[in-house]
């Protein structure tokens, strides 16, 4: 899997793809993402067929862009932020992907580490961007700590850690993409599959973190224009 960023022009995508092929020393790429959406270039122009990738993916793409891209070439996966405190995609993007048979890759499934205890049970790394994230600062953080405590108690009820419980609530057709720099966290994340949940359990997990009670915007202001609700591509003339 690899991706292009910054620009959606065919020339830039081609250049990034070629460079990825050289770095990886392979003849083709299995899954190639347009990472974030270039709102200045029609998606119809971005998706050029060169025979050097097997499957196409999009990231944080607007539902209109997903539909138009899929009409040109089957989209295999859509990578989009999804966690217990970021669930707006349940209203539109997830139903559309399921209707079209597109896989859902959830990035930041632990809420940028919040459900792993960042800024609560462990301090934030020095210089981390999370330190200025709206949900990790000031009054917002204090309010969100109440949600974490409630969720941690539920995890204890199920005999697992909060991160393990968080990774399980999204459904069998959602692939979470947690990031970590620690082997112990990687091992714990993998062990989450041993936790068995009923449909009633899944509902209880969702209910314990009401979206209406989450305090703070889900993205830094500088990145808000790239979120899927507003990051649509123009129509091809």
Image: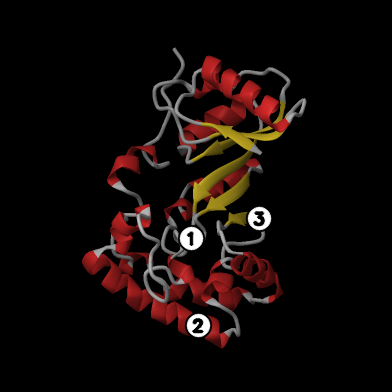
Label 3 environment density (alpha carbons within 10 Å; few <14, some 14–19, many ≥20)? few
Could you tell me which residue is drawn at 37 percent across and 69 percent down? 119
The image position of residue 29, as x and y in percent, is: 71, 31
Q: In this view, does 131 lie to the left or right of 152?
A: left
Is there a contact, CB below 8 Å, between mark 1 and mark 3?
no
User: Which quadrant of the structure image shows residue 230?
Assistant: top left
Using the numbered discs, state the Cα–Cα distance from disc 1 to disc 2 in whole angstroms.
Answer: 16 Å
* Marks 3, 2: nearer the viewer: 2
The residue singled out by tag 2 in the image is: 154
Q: Earlier in the sequence, mark 3 or mark 2?
A: 2
Q: Pick whichever, 232 or 157, lies toward us.
A: 157
The image position of residue 62, as x and y in percent, is: 45, 37
The residue singled out by tag 1 in the image is: 83
Up/down of 230 relative to 46, above or below: below
Could you tell me which residue is drawn at 53 percent across and 52 percent down? 107
Could you tell me which residue is drawn at 61 percent across and 18 percent down? 48
Label 2 environment density (alpha carbons within 10 Å; few <14, some 14–19, many ≥20)? some
Up/down of 84 relative to 218, above or below: below
Task: Please tell me whether mark 2 sits on a helix, a strand or a loop.
Answer: helix
Could you tell me which residue is drawn at 70 percent across and 32 percent down? 24
Using the numbered discs, state the Cα–Cα distance from disc 1 to disc 3 in whole angstroms.
Answer: 14 Å
Q: Tell me the quarter of the image containing the N terminus.
A: top right
* Marks 1, 3: nearer the viewer: 1
């Amino acid at each position: 899997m690899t991706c292009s960023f910054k620009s959606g022009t065919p020339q830039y995508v081609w250049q990034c793809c070629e460079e990825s092929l050289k770095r990886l020393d392979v003849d083709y790429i299995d899954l190639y993402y347009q990472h974030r959406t270039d709102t200045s270039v029609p998606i119809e122009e971005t998706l050029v067929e060169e025979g050097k990738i097997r499957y196409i993916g999009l990231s944080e793409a607007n539902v209109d862009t997903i539909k138009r891209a899929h009409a040109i070439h089957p989209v295999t996966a859509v990578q989009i932020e999804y966690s217990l405190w970021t669930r707006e995609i349940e209203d539109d993007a997830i139903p559309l992907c399921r209707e079209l048979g597109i896989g859902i890759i959830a990035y930041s499934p632990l809420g940028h580490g919040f459900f792993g205890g960042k800024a609560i049970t462990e301090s934030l790394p020095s210089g981390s961007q999370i330190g200025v994230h709206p949900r990790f600062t000031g009054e917002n953080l204090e309010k969100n700590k109440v949600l974490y405590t409630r969720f941690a108690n539920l995890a204890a009820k199920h005999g697992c850690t909060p991160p393990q419980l968080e990774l399980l609530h999204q459904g069998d057709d959602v692939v979470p993409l947690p990031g970590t720099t620690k082997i112990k966290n990687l091992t714990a994340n993998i062990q989450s599959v041993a936790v068995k949940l009923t449909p009633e359990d899944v509902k209880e997990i969702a209910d314990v973190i009401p979206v209406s009670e989450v305090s703070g915007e889900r993205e830094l202001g500088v990145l808000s224009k790239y979120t899927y609700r507003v990051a649509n591509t123009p129509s091809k003339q």
